[in-house]
Image (tube, helix red, strand yellow):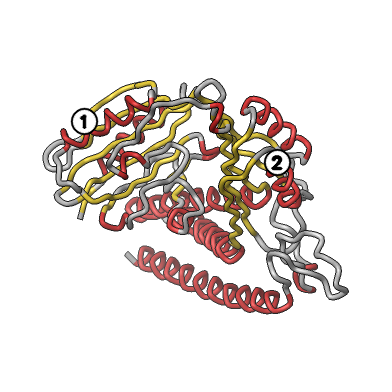
Amino acid sequence: MKQSGEIIKLMAAVFLSVILFSCGTAQKQSALYEKNAESDEEAIGGSRADGKPSPAPYMKRKSAAAEKKESFSMDKAGKKDESRPDTGRIIIYQANYIIDVESVSRSVKDAGSLAARYDGFIESAATSDSYRYARIIIRVPVRSFETALKDLESMGTVISKEVSASDVTMEYNDVRMRMETAKKVRDRMYELLKRSKDVKERVKILREIERLTSIIDSLSSRIQFMKNRADYSTIVVELRARVREVSSTYLPSPFMWIASLNPDRRSIFKNSRSIEHGKPEGFYHLEKEYRARTQEFLFATPGETAGIRAGVVENYPPGDLEFWEESFKIEFDNRRFKTVSRKEIGSGPLRFIRHDFEPYAGTVYSIAFAVSGENIIVVEARLKAGDDYEKNSSRLDEFIRSVICD
């Protein structure tokens, strides 16, 4: 009992010392960034004191303090990544375009050439309807972001354009600090484990080590995600054949939420706090970006081979699940999406119907919905076809089962 009391006191001392260390470091870090922010130029369209344009219009200029800091970005070989300027800040850039072009097939090849020209790469590309539509995700080094956008706009007529910049420096450092703190605590737990002789105490310590390891892995994944997004900017471009090339008798559904469903664009924006759900295994939780509307999906896998989002729409005109499924089937029959499967998930008052389609080669679009009083709960997922689909499809089912309506 005496040894057990000593271990408890040691554990309390470890946690207290680490918390004090974390708080002190956070205060110093916050003061440093406030000081740097005062001397930074405007993030977009800045200019130098001599009147000449800034060398990277989308990046803030380095302050004297930031000059001394090493960039957080490292390539796979562990070397410093020169693809973006060392500003001491972690900024994520993304652009979303819809462009009408004369030839979609030719423009797809041009997009590949554009990515290669700026030392970037095509993250994903999909076409449909005999090359009348394509969706491409291009990743380019951040220093080439603005120039790449200008080249992209020359491909055709820009129908819509959205460019966003998110400074995640404070979040990045906060997450990194929390990870380092968790590692220090785990190291002390290992020391306590070596000293403890009591079986029950060892079990408690091992459980705490397991919990800390899970936290460290989660924080590490978040850090890697932010670094990857900051090193290589994301350009999402939808290419559409000009109207004169397309003949179609498609008439959209009279129900807006059904007509708006799209695997490549988020259409349900109502606040989803009226529902609760779990986190699918193997997915990042991107709640902050999702609510800021800078990410299409609430959950995404590494590499974004799968994404899941959920929302609520009004049950108007009032209808039951069978009514809405019939309306849904009419819409997607008109779209001529290839049907993959249909299943029912759950039972009782919250019964979901899930339909899977193949809107274009290599992609499965999954839609599940349930009626709950005055609301319709909608879950959407875009999954890569093949082995990834088989694996993530079951995870999607588990996520749907976890949904609870307030």
Residue visible at 60% across and 40% down in the picture = 99
Disc 1 target residue: 326
Quadrant for the C terminus in the image: bottom left
Decide which of tag 2 and tag 1 comes sooner along the chain.
2
Q: How many labels does the image show?
A: 2
Residue nearest the observer in this picture, 392 or 293: 293
Residue visible at 29% across and 36% down in the picture = 368
Most extreme residue toward the left is: 348
Q: Look at label 1 and name its amino acid.
A: Glu
Q: Nearer the viewer, mark 2 or mark 1?
A: 1
Name the image quarter holding residue 10.
Answer: bottom left
Callout 2: SS:
loop
Residue 388 appears in view = no
Q: Look at label 2 and name its amino acid.
A: Lys
Residue visible at 21% across and 41% down in the picture = 370
Q: How crowded is mark 1: few (under 14 residues within 10 Å), some or many (20 or more)?
A: few
Quadrant for the N terminus in the image: bottom left
Residue 403 appears in view = yes
Q: Residues within 10 Å of mark 2 (few under 14, many from 20)?
A: few
Q: Relative to 245, is 200 on the left or the right? A: left
Taking 140 as reference, is 30 above or below it? below
Residue nearest the observer in this picture, 119 or 76: 119
Residue 52 image offset from top left, x and y in percent: 86, 68
Residue nearest the observer in this picture, 260 or 233: 260
Residue 157 image offset from top left, x and y in percent: 63, 42
Callout 1: SS:
helix
Disc 2 target residue: 76
Residue visible at 30% across and 58% down in the picture = 273
Most extreme residue toward the front is: 244
Residue 56 image offset from top left, x and y in percent: 77, 59
Q: Relative to 196, is 18 on the left or the right? A: right
Residue 111 image offset from top left, x and y in percent: 68, 34
